[in-house]
Image (spheres, rainbow, N blue to C red):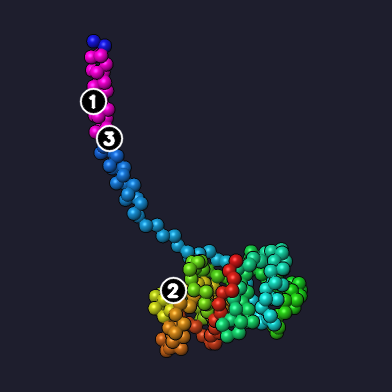
Amino acid sequence: MKQLKFLSTLGIAFVFLFSSCSGDEGKTTDTATTADTTATTPTTQSTVDTTPQTILVVWHKVADFAKWKTSYDGHDSMRLAGGIHNYVIGRSVEDSNMILVATKADDVAKAKAFIKDPSLKAAMQKGGVTGAPSISINTVVYQDQAQNMSPLRSMTMFKVKDWNAWKTAFESNRQLRTDNGLTDRAYGYDPDDNHKVILVVAINDTAKANAYWNSDLIKQKRAESGVVGEVKRYVYRVAQRY
């Protein structure tokens, strides 16, 4: 009798367990389906930053790059004290001793104070800088921070009739630049005069880029966007990005 009672109890438990599993089967399938759907939804994070950033750009020639770089790194505390932060160092394609130094500044006032500091001139002389440097302060409003971008870059400086009109026209032609071997890296303007524009692009195809820069098409696009006067271009390769 005891054995019969035990078997009966076991049978009831088995039926209850089986019924419970059958009832949850649909829920389990629904959960798995939901999870699969979520997993297949692509998430792409933009690498573009449109927060205005003060960028200090210095071009100068050095007698010896290795010596200059050692001296530059040794003055990092001086830059930090002035609210200046390392960003990019580049070397001209035409002359590897012509150096681009781009730094981020806490604000425009600190950037202006830094370039007037006598210790900057002393540091340059110690590093073997030759000739007068070319210095510009810029409010950069577009930066593509993608890590896989070509290290070969072009920095262009020019004047425009109207900043907003130029910006609208420039952004509308992004695909045109892509088709001609260029990717927008950064652009902005002089904080004291937004008619002065700075533009940095990555060069993905040198032949296409050169052909585009020498074409009538780019002359037409510049005219339509309000570019006036001389266009200065520096082609360089990124030597270090901090």
Look at the image and give the residue range highlighted in magenta. Answer: 3-24
Tell me: residue 186, above or below residue 21.
Answer: below
Residue 232 counted in the magenta span: no
Q: Is residue 196 left or right of residue 76?
A: left
Q: Nearer the viewer, residue 87 or 16?
A: 16
Q: Write down the quadrant of residue 67 in the picture.
A: bottom right
Does any portion of residue 145 appear in the rendered image? yes
Residue 15 numbered mark, or none? 1
Residue under the point 46% across and 74% down:
183
- Quadrant location of residue 110? bottom right
Examine the structure image and report whether residue 5 is included in the region drawn in magenta: yes
Q: Residue at x 24, y 29 (%)?
A: 19
Q: Identify which residue, 34 or 192, lies in the foreground.
A: 34
- Choose the circle earlier in sequence order: 1 or 2: 1
| Residue 43 in the image, given as x and y percentages of width and height | 40, 57
Residue type for callout 1: Val
Q: Identify residue for label 3.
A: 24
**Residue 74 relative to residue 105: left or right:** right
* In the rendered image, the vertical position of residue 45 relative to residue 233, given as above or below: above
Q: Earlier in the sequence, mark 3 or mark 1?
A: 1
Q: Nearer the viewer, mark 3 or mark 2?
A: 3
One can see residue 192 in this view = no
Q: Which residue bears the numbered disc 2?
A: 171
Which of the two discs, 3 and 1, sits closer to the camera? 1
Q: Residue furthest front?
A: 3
Is 81 on the left or on the right of 171, as rendered? right
The quadrant of the rendering that contains the N terminus is top left
